[in-house]
Image (spheres, coloured by chain):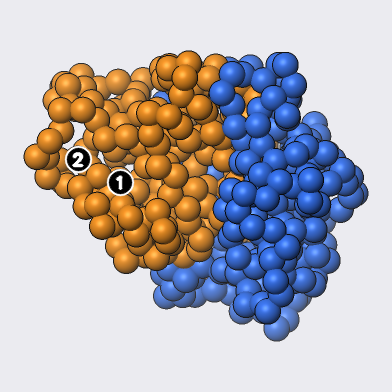
Amino acid sequence: MSEHDHHHHDHDHDDDHSHLSETELRVRALESILVEKGYVDPQALEAILQTYEEKVGPRNGARVVARAWSDPEFMEWLQRDSTAAVASMGYTGRQGEHIVALINTPEVHNVVVCTLCSCYPWPVLGLPPAWYKSAAYRSRVVIEPRQVLAEFGLTLPDETKVRVWDSTSEMRYIVIPMRPAATDGWSVEQLEELVIRDSMVGVREARSPQSASSTTTDGSTSNAR
Amino acid sequence: MNSIHDMGGMHGFGQIPDIDGPEPFHHDWERRMFALNFAIGGLGLWNIDMSRAAMEATPPDEYLAGDDYFRRFLVRLERLAVKHALVSQDELASGIGSEPPRTGLNAIKPQQVATMVRNGNSSMRSSSRQALFKVGDRVRALRINPATHTRLPRYVRGCEGVITLVQGVHVFPDASVLGNEDPQWLYSVLFDGIIVWGRDAEPGLEIVVDAFEPYLEAA
């Protein structure tokens, strides 16, 4: 996979260039007309982008998970009132007004989807990745989750139940993955490094200490940065 | 509305795309589109259910074009902007304003963004209404097929499940889309995969769907 940061420049594929150009032109026309008519302040657009590109992202969720692994009282609070527990760390608001933490165990593995649109817990995970919004993920994960998880490299034991949560209301779900083995005595900060975004959607597990110490980067270790 | 957006259980969409792709944006126009959608939503002309209904009314071929979420945002926002007389079709086509703007609207200011993000917009409402169901109750999702907005996916309609969480009283999307909040109790209902998919269910599958009380009956 590519490690480049693509956020700030185009990299249209040649084979669909005309399609994207048409889309791009329409976006530009829409933006310029909305700004010209005074419905949109261009500085507000910059503030919105800065918020979701620099401030709100999956590191927030990783802090919640690492604390839940480290602090039994916080874990208990998270299970009793996830919204309040998460809010106590400063993670509140838009697309995460009501949060439920789903605790993975050897018996039950939780996975989150929104089959009807793309609901996702923004305050703790940021904006959803493209695959989460894809027709393939939305259609398949409720009927064949094990096959979907296999595409992410995750194979669960047959005896583990797979519980798929379809976000059909304004409740937002975050998965608390199981704490990796051989992490006794690790600090909260060390544990945070093991918590990748995909483990909080439920399509991967948290990183193992071995993969965390490895210098090579595969897809599963880069996506919470 | 039984439209293309209600995708749970469909076959034929292939492998999960871009599982290690760059996130959250792939192109600069996607960034612009995301921010525009946020900013125009802040004018308060439509609520989230009206916005979702506009997406669901997108013709299937257009909805699926490129399977691109931000392109869907574009198509929807163009349609909503014309419907609410923010712009005309001609202005959209040319990108040049030829008519005076709609008055009485306040564009969101940059200093409002942090507060909007932090506070969000809760769907929960206080209510003295008693919940009909409690955790552990067996319920059946109704067989309904409204041509208007609903949040009960087709794949659980008619299926029996068990209440697993009681989530409080929230704005009811089916009414909110028509401009009336009509708050209702909300439940997370757990369905056994076998009940939903029959013998084609993967072993050990459970599905939880958030369902408003009017979607449910005692089973």
Determine which residue is flagged by label 1: A65
The percent position of residue B138, horizontal first and vertical second, equals 71, 46
Q: Nearer the viewer, residue A44 or B139?
A: B139
Q: Quadrant of residue A144?
A: top right
The chain that appears blue in the image is B
Q: Is residue B26 above or below residue A211?
A: below
Q: Is residue A180 left or right of residue B219?
A: left
Instruction: Name the kind of residue labelled 1 in the image.
Output: Val
Q: Nearer the viewer, residue B37 or B4?
A: B4
Determine which residue is flagged by label 2: A191
| Quadrant placement of the N terminus of chain A | top left
The percent position of residue A8, horizontal first and vertical second, equals 40, 42
| Quadrant placement of the C terminus of chain A | top left
Residue at horizontal 45%, vertical 38%?
A201
Instruction: Name the kind of residue labelled 2 in the image.
Output: Leu
Residue at horizontal 12%, vertical 35%?
A184
Q: Is residue B42 above or below residue B75?
A: below
> Which hue belongs to chain A?
orange
- In the structure shown, which secondary structural element does the residue marked by tag 1 occupy? helix
- In the structure shown, which secondary structural element does the residue marked by tag 2 occupy? helix
Q: Are marks 1 and 2 in contact (CB under 8 Å)?
A: yes
Residue at horizontal 34%, vertical 23%?
A219
The image's mark for residue A81 is: none
